[in-house]
Amino acid sequence: MLTLPALKADPRVAFAGAFDLRDEARVRFAVEFGVPAFETLDALLRSPDIDAVYIATPHELHAEQVIAALRAGKHVLVEKPMATSLADCARMERASAEAGKVLVVGPSHGFDAPVQVAAELVASGKYGAVRMVTALNFTDFIFRPRRSEELDSDRGGGVVYSQAAHHIDVVRRLVGLPVTSVRAVAANWDSSRSSEGAYTALMTFAAGAVASLTYSGYAHYDSDELLGWISELGYDKDPARYGEARKNLAALSSQDEIEAKLRRTYGAPDASANDALARYHEHFGFILLSCERADLKLSPKGLSIYGDAEREFLPIAPPELPRKEVIDEFVGACLGTRRPIHDGRWGFDTIACCVALLESSRRRTDVAPNRLLDTLSEKL
């Protein structure tokens, strides 16, 4: 639902079909877009009218569906996380190479325009090497209506695969160097919603840069306050709605929660994608990038740059289309006009960092993502 407005608004994208298990979703799609809606993924992949597939299914289904689409000769844009295991990521990356088809992992907040602009400034060398990144985000993620697998760590649930994947993408994009070690604590503080709901991690990069990542999905504090009450998706946010998620959840039975989640999905009678263009760029909380000669603070409106003797604000024009950066990268890769940044290898490395975060928390020690990949290679 969140990316549908982007796909609808972009003139480079034409819908040619969809697959969903739910009758109501298929009926609505066929009526809204005037194209076939298939009952099975195999039927969709057999369609000669489809060049590329966007996969936005539960995390645990990504690997098999992506591999099937690539083998059917389709380019693939798959939601983060790429998959829920390193072995699956390896299979997906190999399938992309063997098929000669594009695999891009996104959307994620690593695509956000302020992140892209800051990364380009870092790459230019204007402010010297990156020394440190400070990233924090406090939300009520855990208390929003969830499907069962979203709160099951073994099935890719919890905030590490769903939210740390954003955080890691952002800091990797900003620093532009490989992650050499992760030290982290992932926390489960609510037995009734038993999965990781918070984490804090210290990531070390080649050349010595460090990034501290803190995320809480249990928060009473809303860190959007630090971003001028602009929501994660770039819309103005009403502070008066404080505590709404907890209040709403407290009034729901388990079945009510399932139904509340379904009401937010495509095809549900009450569901509607927000076609109104966001006034600001998307974000993933407070991000401060510390370089040799300046600190850069990212915001949905642009970058605040604090130099040795001066500070300035670098505005970034409001979005022309929602999630344009994602579509730019994917379409360009499909047409062969640009090399994607967030390809299968990128997604694989981000999942290696997620696994390292969980392993570090479990073992209470530093974990090197590349060692995890080396161990996997020995097994394959």
Image (spheres, grey):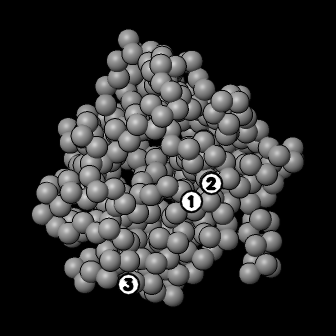
Tell me the amino acid under the disc marked 2: Arg
**Left or right side of 232 for 14:** left
Tell me the amino acid under the disc marked 1: Glu
Q: Is residue 168 visible?
A: no
Label 3 SS: loop
Q: Residues within 10 Å of mark 3 (few under 14, many from 20)?
A: some
Residue 300 found in image quarter: top left
Residue 101 found in image quarter: bottom left
Which residue appears at 14% of the width and 55% of the height? 32
Label located before the other in sequence (3 or 1): 1
Q: CA distance from mark 3 to mark 2?
A: 28 Å
Which residue appears at 60% of the width and 69% of the height? 89
Which residue appears at 48% of the width and 34% of the height? 255
Q: Is residue 140 above or below residue 368?
A: above
Label 1 SS: helix
Q: Nearer the viewer, mark 3 or mark 1?
A: 1
Q: CA distance from mark 3 to mark 1?
A: 22 Å
Q: Is residue 138 above or below residue 359?
A: above
Which sits in the foreground, 52 or 177?
52
Tell me the amino acid under the disc marked 3: Gly
Which sits in the foreground, 281 or 268?
268
Which residue appears at 20% of the width and 69% of the height? 36
Q: Is residue 191 visible?
A: yes
CB atoms at circles 2 and 1 under 8 Å apart? yes
Q: Residues within 10 Å of mark 2 (few under 14, many from 20)?
A: some
Q: Residues within 10 Å of mark 1 (few under 14, many from 20)?
A: many
How far from the left and from the top, in percent, is residue 309?
A: 52, 27
Residue 60 shows which numbered tag? Answer: 1
Q: Which residue is mark 3?
A: 73
Q: Which residue is mark 2?
A: 155
